[in-house]
């Protein structure tokens, strides 16, 4: 029940209508016995400062930030976590006495999601598809968590090279190499973890995959698609058809939320509560599946 002691957490973004974050946080709050509510707020670009300051003035316990404000909020924070500063993007603001401190749980959430699937990027040879916002976070994850080598394949080579340069420089190790989308044909190995970070295959374009050639899928031992709408993408189907293991991005979304919730409340979320939350998220995405007719820019949260 909401009462005088209820604490509020918020999502700031644009758009926010299809977000699953309220499902995550309101479910976790109930399961963990925390008197807290989580509400989405639509924030226009020119009002990011007022939104952060307003959240502080209203005594909000914590804030999530999503597309397109993940970098724009940084100047209005009192502090920033080292890894988030390196990435240059935050998705979680934690209240401190001086103001909000920024964190990036997209990266740690993806790390935990991969671990939950039995995958550690450390020492892995990775093929990363894409160079947009979602793929960039995955590139930082690979570089900062010790991937052996990352081949970043992108339609625009120039954009891929810019991301590779930035991540290599900031991570202080030269492990990312940019290539065009057919760069896989030059690779010597035959066992890669592939992270699908492009927007190709998002609902309603469920019959598209960024690479269709079956030869590519013979190189994939595990395919992790950052997309979770639809739950079973064409990329995942192609991975499985070639004998690999395939996962969608819903667990990344779950764990970025779990990590934010833990930062705000100090509670350590139990595995059974995270599992319960995941089932609730699946129910909502299944219900929404029929009505999603266009890609929302906030898809990766
Ligand atoms: P997000 O923030 O969700 O990652 P984004 O920043 O728009 O979205 O990035 C989209 C990614 O999907 C990019 O890597 C884009 O490739 P380009 O950099 O060449 O634009 C990739 N992408 C989108 N449509 C594509 C298509 N039809 N074929 C190949 N790649 C595509």
Image: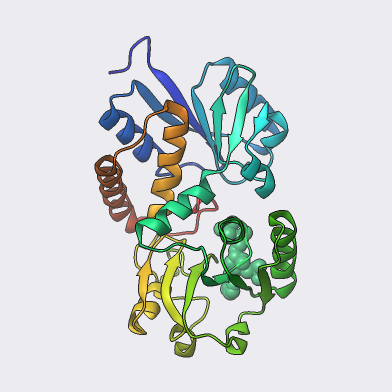
| Vertical side of 208 occupied by 295: above or below | above
Residue 42 on image: x %, y %: 54, 35
The mark total stands at 0
Which residue: 62% across, 88% down? 186
The quarter in which the N terminus is drawn is top left
- Left of 12 or right of it: where is 73? right
Front residue of this view, candidates 211 and 88: 88
| Vertical side of 149 occupied by 188: above or below | below
The image's colour scheme reads: rainbow
Residue 235 on image: x %, y %: 43, 74
Toward which corner of the image does residue 48 lie, by quadrant?
A: top right
Residue 50 on image: x %, y %: 66, 25
Residue 196 on image: x %, y %: 50, 68
Which residue: 33% across, 29% down? 29
In the current view of this chain or complex, which residue is farthest to the top? Answer: 4
| Vertical side of 205 occupied by 167: above or below | above
Front residue of this view, candidates 116 and 62: 116
Indicate the quadrant of ligand 1 in the picture: bottom right
Toward which corner of the image does residue 44 lie, by quadrant?
A: top right
- Whether residue 18 is visible: no
Which residue: 33% across, 57% down? 289
- Whether residue 192 is visible: yes
Which residue: 58% across, 89% down? 185
Front residue of this view, candidates 273 and 82: 82
């Amino acid at each position: 029940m909401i009462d005088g002691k209820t604490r509020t957490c918020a999502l700031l973004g644009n758009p926010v209508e299809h977000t699953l974050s309220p499902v995550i946080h309101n479910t976790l709050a109930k399961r963990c016995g925390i008197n807290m509510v989580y509400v989405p707020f639509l924030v226009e670009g020119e009002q990011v400062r007022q939104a952060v300051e307003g959240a502080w003035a209203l005594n909000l316990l914590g804030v999530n930030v999503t597309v397109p404000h993940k970098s724009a909020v940084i100047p209005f924070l009192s502090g920033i976590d080292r890894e988030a500063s390196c990435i240059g993007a935050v998705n979680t603001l934690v209240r401190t006495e001086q103001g909000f401190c920024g964190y990036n749980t997209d990266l740690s959430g993806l790390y935990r999601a991969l671990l939950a699937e039995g995958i550690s990027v450390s020492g892995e040879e990775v093929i990363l598809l894409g160079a947009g916002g979602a793929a960039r976070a995955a590139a930082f994850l690979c570089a900062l968590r010790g991937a052996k080598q990352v081949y970043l394949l992108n339609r625009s080579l120039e954009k891929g090279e810019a991301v590779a340069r930035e991540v290599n420089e900031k991570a202080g190790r030269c492990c990312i190499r940019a290539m065009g989308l057919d760069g896989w044909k030059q690779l010597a190995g035959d066992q890669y973890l592939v992270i699908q970070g492009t927007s190709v295959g998002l609902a309603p374009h469920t019959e598209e995959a960024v690479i269709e050639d079956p030869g590519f899928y013979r190189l994939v031992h595990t395919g992790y698609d950052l997309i979770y709408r639809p739950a079973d993408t064409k990329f995942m189907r192609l991975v499985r058809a070639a004998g690999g293991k395939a996962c969608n991005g819903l667990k990344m979304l779950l764990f970025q939320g779990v990590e934010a919730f833990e930062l705000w409340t100090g509670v350590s979320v139990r595995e059974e509560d995270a599992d319960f939350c995941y089932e609730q998220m699946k129910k909502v995405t299944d219900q929404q599946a029929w009505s999603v007719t266009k890609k929302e820019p906030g898809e990766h949260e």
